[in-house]
Structures are given as C-alpha cells and as structure tokens.
Image (cartoon, rainbow, N blue to C red):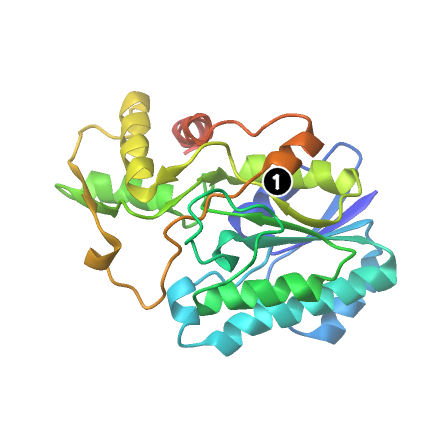
Amino acid sequence: MKALIVGANGQLGRSLAANAPEGVAVVAHGSDTLDITDADAVRASVEAQRPDFLFNAAAYTAVDKAESDEAAALAVNATAVGHLAAAARAAGARFIHVSTDFVFDGRQGIPYAPDAPTAPIGAYGRTKLAGEAAAGADALVVRTAWVYAPTGGNFVRTMLRLMAERPEVRVVADQVGTPTYAPGLAAALWTLAGQGARGIHHYTDSGAASWYDFAVAIQEEALAAGLLDRCVPVLPIATADYPTPARRPFYSVLDKTATFAALGQPAPHWRVQLRAMIEAIRTYG
C-alpha cells in the first residue's frame, strides 16, 4: 500500500511519516516540492503516485496573520483542500484531512461533539470550516487542538526557551482546551484511515487544561528531566491582558467519545504525552 502525505515538513506531517504502519510506502511532500494551491500540480502528483491514502497535514496556521490576510489562509485551508479531495477521489484514494477546534466559538462550556453547531470567531476558524466542506462527505475529517511535537514551532518549545531565558513567564489562564502530542494524533489518523472511517471525528489527548496549566506542567516535567536548571514564576493572566489580532475560543475541549470507541481505547492523558515529549527532547535533543 502507498500513502501520500502533504504538509510533510510540519510537526504532524513528520509524525505521520514516522508512524506509518509496516508495509505502507510513504511519499511525502512539503510546500517546497508541491504547491497544493495549484490544482494541476496536485492532480499530476496524485495521478503519478496513485496512493491508497492521501493525508493532508498542510495548513495555514498563523491565526493572527489570517485576520489581515484571510485570502491567503483560505487558499491553503479551503481551496487547496478541494484540489486534494478531487484528486484523491479521481485516484480512488482515501482522503484524510485535519481540522481544528477553532471551528467553534468556545461559548458552550462542555466538550464539543462532532455534530455540535459550528461558529468560528475568526478568519482561521472560518477558513478551516470551509476546508471541511471542501473535503467532501467521503473524506475522513479529524478535528484536533493544541498540537505539539519535539521539533517545529509550538507552545512547549516556546515555553522551554522562555523559562530558560526570563526571570518569569506570564501565560493566559482563561482559555481551556486539550494539548495533543503529534505522534499520538498521527497514530490515531493511521488507525482511523485503515478502518475506512469517514465523516467528522474529534481527537486530542485526554483531559483538559488552560494554557497556564500547560505551562506549569511543562516547567515541572522539564525540571524533573533536567532540561531546565531553575524554576521561574509562572504567572496567570487573562486574555484581556494579552491582546491579539484574532480572538480565541475560551473553551474548546472536544468530545472524543466516538473516536475513542472506534480506536478501542482512549488517548493517553495530555500530561503523560507531555512527559513523553520532554523525554524525547532529553534523549534526542
């Protein structure tokens, strides 16, 4: 069997390639080798490879920049998804697309089920919701949140740097969601794809946390592993104290009940996965 992965240079794309099941040949494209906004290029690539699975791990994820350049975000997060879905359909490949908790407004206060009403509050969320529609009813669409990995730019690596450089760090405490370790997400995507799953699914690690909770845990785990040599104050602040161009959902925990049932087990708790990430950095750099 063969899988084509686009967005292969990102943290999820790398994790998908690293976690490919035995016997699956992987062809990986980053933006440097395939422009997914070019319909002809996408069609030609998929026709040439004839994959059994096409994973879209590419996305415009600059949430704040999207507010002033929604057209660019829409081109990657929606128009390109339509190109990929059409090419996969023509080749008889299963299309797996990754979406986001930002399709919700964060006002519900309880975990969002896959069929909960969507109401994005910013350009990024709007473009990702448009991408879900462009993927089509025959695609597997998996919404996730707060993704991080040992490589790439993410909250964990940023916190480790700031905690090493600064006398204190201030972190938003009134936005709640669930951190998600990219290798675990990748493994879940492979399993669901292999099962022939379609429609909208939710997947994150288990549990919930604020960004402040996450930051405190990062420091505790990094100190225990020897990645940090001193403890600095982590101070909780309100969203209003850290204004950004884009609004964020205050509560975006996803209901994964159906997905966990399909996988046969729940995801590990986010704290367990954070510890795995810290250990990976300690071991491999």
Secondary element at tag 1: helix
Q: In x, y percent, where is residue 111? A: 49, 42
Q: In x, y percent, where is residue 283? A: 43, 26
219 left or right, relative to 193? left
2 left or right, relative to 231? right
Residue type highlighted by circle 1: Ala
In the displayed structure, would residue 84 be above or below residue 205? below
172 left or right, relative to 141? left
Q: In x, y percent, where is residue 91? A: 86, 60
In the displayed structure, would residue 143 be above or below residue 133? above
Foreground of the two, 183 or 122: 122
Q: Is residue 264 visible?
A: yes
- Looking at the image, which residue is at 60% across and 58% down? 30
Identify the image quadrant of the N terminus: top right
Identify the image quadrant of the C terminus: top left
**Mark 1, residue position:** 186
Q: Is residue 35 visible?
A: no
- Looking at the image, which residue is at 62% across and 51% down? 115
In the displayed structure, would residue 187 be above or below residue 37? above
The quarter of the picture where residue 275 lies is top left
The quarter of the picture where residue 117 lies is bottom right
